Image: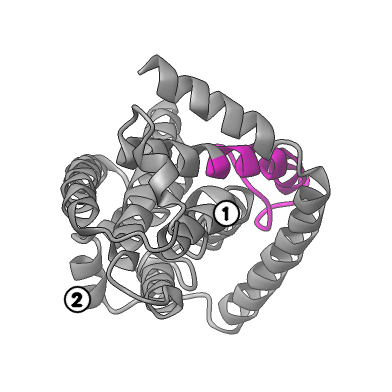
Amino acid sequence: MRKYLTYFRIRFIGGLQYRAAALAGISTQFAWGFLYILLYSAFYRADPTGFPMEFQQLASYVWLQQAFLALFMNWYYDSDILGMISGGTIAYELVRPLDIYVLWFTKTVAARVSRAVLRCFPILIVAFLLPDPYGLTLPPTPLHAVMFVLTMVLGMFVVTAFSMLIYCACFYTVNATGVRMVAQAVADFLSGGELPLPFMPAAMRRVIELTPFGVMQNLPFRIYSGNITGNEMWFLTGMQLLWTTALILIGWFWMRAALKKVVVQGG
């Protein structure tokens, strides 16, 4: 375990070096955050009744989504890992005395956390300073705050485990672009990246919440805003634990099966 923690620290510190990229990302996420809030504000002012979320809850959801985008973005795939799979340099990874699945999982988590740390604080500070109901508010109870942190960590693990499945699938393709594009489009929409799940048809939302996509960013952000509470919060957190375990196990066994048949050409 110590060697993986050391690798995490190295990758995390390396990710903190890209400050210029972080500044560009912060400005972009501020723009998207204000754009989304102004867009939804127009709909709420036109007809303030019948919406599944209070506008304040929606504003908190949007700002949290922008602040922690790096943790949950489904379009992030490590170019080094994809290059190893397609180019054959995975041979160097196979000679290391490490489990390649755990190594790549650690690398992906470190990259996501380092990017989030660089970007989240300026967005959160500004969002807290905005006037109601356009800004970010505190969770309704201390329990919601604790559950937000717990489900956000587990949600990041679910996203990372899902991306590991895509890496496994890339062992069976000549070009990984198609697999990645389909996966990221489906995952981003079903996880609430484009539209919060409460705004979807009720029957569709109930089905999505039982899938791994429903317990990615959707769950922690709605818990923070108070849109999910009580028994529903505990049930969906249990689903999140289930999917975290299931996806990691599936990915680990699939990786072992893929590596038994991997062919590295050249020399």
The residue positioned 55% from the left and 63% from the top of the image is 55
Q: Nearer the viewer, residue 165 or 65?
A: 165
Main secondary structure along the magenta-highlighted residues:
helix
Is 17 left or right of 97, judged from the image as shown? right
Query: What amino acid is at disc 1?
Result: Leu
Res 176 quadrant in image: bottom left
**Which residue is the extreme one toward the top?**
2
Residues in magenta, as a range:
111-138
For the image, the number of numbered tags is 2
Measured from the top left, where is residue 42 in percent x and y?
65, 80
Tag 2 residue: 203
SS of the residue under disc 1: helix
Tag 1 residue: 69
Q: Does residue 151 appear in this view?
A: no
In the rendered image, the vertical position of residue 243 relative to residue 196, given as above or below: above
Front: mark 2 or 1: 1
Q: Marks 2 and 1: CB-CB under 8 Å?
A: no
The residue positioned 31% from the left and 64% from the top of the image is 171
Q: Quadrant of the C terminus?
A: bottom left
Query: What amino acid is at disc 2?
Result: Ala
In magenta stretch: residue 133 = yes
